[in-house]
Amino acid sequence: MLVKDAQIVRLVDRIGEHYRTNISNGFLRPALFQLSMEKQTWDWLETLTEKLEHFRYQGFHMDELYRQIIAAARFVSLARRELAPNLRNRLSTGGNSPMDRVLRDMAINNFGSNLQVFADLVGELFQNLLKIDNSKTKNRKPVHMSMPELLEVGRLLAGE
């Protein structure tokens, strides 16, 4: 089933913009690549955060969007557990101008709160998609009912 809802498109756009600007920016990206995440999970996360133009007009396949949400939730959980506690130690400090050091320190200091904003946006997307999925159900089972891994999304985004 294709989802062409304007609110979904806006949320995906906000998620991608926030991710690129505040989480996967030039200062933090080297540390992100140290996370032990499966390639398929990285691919789904990249599709969610980088490739909106592919879906803006044709719509999102609901099952694929659910997979992207699962990937984002797994990323959030892993980043909280493996990256946030020692982010500063994972990033090199040499060779930067004073302005770059200030910007890098700002990115590091705000990583936890930016990760939470990302988690909140993904959670909002998930809730909106569930509503659409359930409302489009006539004589069939909603898509989310056939994806048991979606049961962990709320826990992963909440940090439990």
Image (cartoon, grey):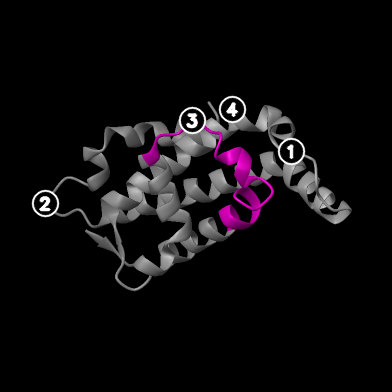
- The mark closer to the camera, 2 or 1, is 1
Dot 1 lies on which element?
Answer: loop
Nearest the eye: 151 or 56? 56
Going from N to C along the chain, the mark reached first, 4 or 2, is 4
Q: Say whether residue 115 is magenta.
A: no
86 versus 10 height, above or below:
above
Choose top left, top right, bottom left or bottom right for residue 30. Answer: top right
Q: Amino acid at mark 3?
A: Ser
Q: Which residues are magenta?
A: 18-39
Dot 2 lies on which element?
Answer: loop
Going from N to C along the chain, the mark reached first, 4 or 3, is 3
What residue is shown with label 3? 36
- C-beta proximity under 8 Å, tags 1 and 4: no
13 versus 105 height, above or below:
below
Nearest the eye: 63 or 87? 87
Label 3, residues with CA under 10 Å away: few <14, some 14-19, many ≥20: few
- Horizontal and vertical percent position of residue 104: 77, 47
Q: CA distance from mark 4 to mark 2?
A: 44 Å
- Left-right relation of 136 to 89: left
